[in-house]
C-alpha cells in the first residue's frame, strides 16, 4: 500500500532483479537433475521460464504482507527469503526442510516469512488468500496478500468465488495469474472459451491490464501500480489484482466496508469474547462470567429481550431446562451479532458450539 508506481532502475536494482532470476533458474536446474536421479521423489513442478514474475512482484511487498503460491512455488519461496538450503531439504523430505520434510515440492511453507505455501490443488490458494485478506481487513491491519495462480486455475470455481468476494468485500488481495499459455499441458484456447483473463475479472467489476510477464521491469511496474492502488484500512476506495507470465495483468478491487450494526466498544468485545470462551463448559462457568455474557449479549442483539442478570449458565448439565435454554438463546444471538458486526467467533470454538446446537437445535443441525 506504500509502494510507488515507478521503480528506481539504477545498477544495483537491475542487478538485484537479474540475480533473483538467475538464482531461481540455477535452483530449478539442480532440482530437475536430482529428480532424474530419483533423489527428489513425488511430483516436481518447475518454475523455470517464469522467474520474472516472482522477481518482479514479491520484492514490491512489505515484510508484513503475505504470499500464497501455486504448486510451482520454488521461485516464490526463494524470492520471499526462504533459505535455499531449507527449500532443498524439503525437496529431499528432510526434517531440516521448511515444512519439516512433510510437504515436499508442492507444500513449501514458512510462517515467519508470511509465506503461506504452495498448494497441490489447482486454484486452492485463491480462497486461502481471500480469507487472509479478510482477516487483515477485519483486524485493521495495513497488509496485502499476494496470491499467485496459473491460468489453468481460471477454470476452477475457486477463482470465481475468490475474485467475487474480493470485489464484493473489497479485500486487499493482489491476484497474480502466471499465464504460460499451457497450464500443465493443455493450450489455453483449447480449454477456455474466453482466453482474455482480464475480461473474465471485468465481470466482477475489476479492471484488467495485460503485461509482458517475460519483462521483469514491466512486471514490477504493474505490481507497484497495483499495490499502490490498495488504500490503508481506514480509506474507502480500492484494492488490487494482477496476472502474470507470458501475459501479466494487474487489476484493482475495492476495500472493506465499515461494519454495520449497533456499536460495540473494545472493552465490551473483549469481555464478551472472554465470557464466550468460558461458556463451552457450562458446568464450570462462573456466575460473573454468565452475567457478563448476558449483559453484553443484551446490548448487542438487536432483538434481544431482557434476561435476568442472575441467570446462571452453570445450571446447564446436558439437559434443556429453562435456564439452559435461555443461556443458549442469548449466546446464539450474541454470536450471530458478533458475526454481523465483523467479529466472528474464534475458529477453535465453532466445533464446540455445533455440539451445543445439537442439543438445543437438532433439526437445524440435520439440515446442514
Image (cartoon, rainbow, N blue to C red):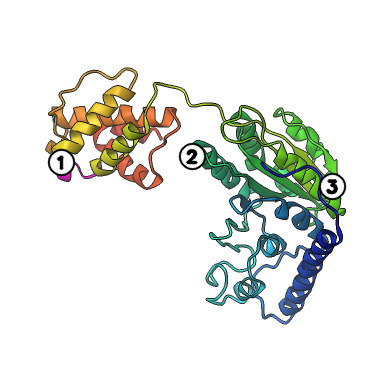
Residues at marks 1 and 3, CA–CA distance in whole angstroms: 61 Å
Pointer 2 or 3: first along the chain: 2
**Which stretch did the figure color magenta?**
280-285
Give the residue displayed 71% in from the left and 44% down from the top. Answer: 3
Give the residue displayed 39% in from the left and 23% down from the top. Answer: 263
**SS label for mark 1:** loop
Locate residue 195, reporting x and y percent. Answer: 83, 40
Q: Residues within 10 Å of mark 1 (few under 14, many from 20)?
A: some
- Of labels 1 and 3, the one closer to you: 1
Q: Is residue 138 left or right of residue 195?
A: left
Q: Look at the numbered discs 2 and 3 and tell me whether their residues touch, using CB distance below 8 Å.
A: no
Locate residue 350, reporting x and y percent. Answer: 36, 42
**SS label for mark 2:** loop
Q: Residue 286's quadrant in the figure?
A: top left
**SS label for mark 3:** loop
Locate residue 67, reporting x and y percent. Answer: 63, 53
Q: Is residue 73 left or right of residue 318?
A: right
Residue occupied by mark 2: 139
Q: Look at the numbered discs 1 and 3 and tell me whether their residues touch, using CB distance below 8 Å.
A: no
Residue occupied by mark 3: 247
- Of labels 2 and 1, the one closer to you: 2
Pointer 1 or 3: first along the chain: 3
- Of labels 2 and 3, the one closer to you: 2
Locate residue 150, reporting x and y percent. Answer: 74, 50
Give the residue displayed 55% in from the left and 72% down from the top. Answer: 101
Q: Quadrant of the C terminus?
A: top left
Residues at marks 2 and 1, CA–CA distance in whole angstroms: 29 Å
Q: Look at the numbered discs 2 and 1 and tell me whether their residues touch, using CB distance below 8 Å.
A: no
Residue occupied by mark 1: 286
Residues at marks 2 and 3, CA–CA distance in whole angstroms: 34 Å
Q: Is residue 1 above or below residue 235?
A: below
Amino acid at each position: 500500500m506504500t509502494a510507488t508506481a515507478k521503480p528506481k532502475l539504477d545498477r544495483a536494482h537491475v542487478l538485484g532483479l537479474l540475480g533473483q532470476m538467475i538464482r531461481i533458474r540455477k535452483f530449478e536446474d539442480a532440482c530437475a537433475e536430482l529428480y532424474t536421479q530419483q533423489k527428489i521423489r513425488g511430483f516436481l513442478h518447475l518454475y523455470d521460464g517464469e522467474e520474472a514474475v516472482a522477481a518482479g512482484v514479491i520484492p514490491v511487498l512489505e515484510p508484513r504482507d503475505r504470499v500464497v503460491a501455486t504448486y510451482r512455488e520454488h521461485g516464490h519461496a526463494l524470492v520471499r527469503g526462504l533459505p535455499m538450503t531449507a527449500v532443498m531439504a524439503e525437496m529431499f523430505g528432510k526434517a531440516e526442510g521448511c515444512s519439516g520434510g512433510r510437504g515436499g515440492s508442492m507444500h513449501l511453507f514458512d510462517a515467519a516469512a508470511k509465506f503461506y505455501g504452495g498448494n497441490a490443488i489447482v486454484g486452492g490458494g485463491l480462497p486461502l488468500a481471500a480469507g487472509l485478506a479478510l482477516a487483515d481487513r477485519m483486524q485493521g491491519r495495513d497488509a496485502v496478500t499476494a496470491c499467485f495462480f496459473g491460468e489453468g486455475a481460471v477454470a476452477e470455481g475457486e477463482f470465481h468465488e475468490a475474485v467475487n468476494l474480493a470485489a464484493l468485500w473489497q479485500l486487499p488481495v493482489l491476484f497474480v495469474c502466471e499465464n504460460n499459455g499451457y497450464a500443465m499441458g493443455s493450450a489455453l484456447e483449447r480449454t477456455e472459451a474466453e482466453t482474455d483473463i482480464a475480461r473474465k475479472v471485468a465481470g466482477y467489476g475489476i479492471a484488467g491490464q495485460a503485461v509482458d510477464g517475460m519483462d521483469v521491469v514491466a512486471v514490477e511496474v504493474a505490481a507497484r501500480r497495483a499495490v499502490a492502488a490498495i488504500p490503508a484500512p481506514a480509506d474507502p476506495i480500492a484494492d488490487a489484482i494482477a496476472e502474470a507470465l507470458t501475459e501479466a495483468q494487474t487489476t484493482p478491487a475495492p476495500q472493506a466496508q465499515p461494519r454495520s450494526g449497533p456499536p460495540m466498544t473494545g472493552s465490551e468485545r473483549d469481555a464478551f469474547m472472554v465470557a464466550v470462551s468460558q461458556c463451552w463448559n457450562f458446568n464450570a462457568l462462573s456466575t460473573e462470567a454468565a452475567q457478563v455474557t448476558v449483559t453484553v449479549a443484551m446490548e448487542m442483539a438487536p432483538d434481544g429481550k431482557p434476561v435476568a442478570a442472575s441467570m446462571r449458565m452453570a445450571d446447564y448439565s446436558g439437559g434443556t431446562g429453562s435456564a439452559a435454554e435461555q443461556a443458549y438463546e442469548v449466546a446464539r444471538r450474541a454470536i450471530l451479532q458478533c458475526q454481523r458486526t465483523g467479529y466472528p467467533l474464534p475458529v477453535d470454538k465453532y466445533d464446540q458450539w455445533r455440539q451445543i446446537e445439537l442439543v438445543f437445535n437438532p433439526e437445524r443441525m440435520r439440515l446442514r
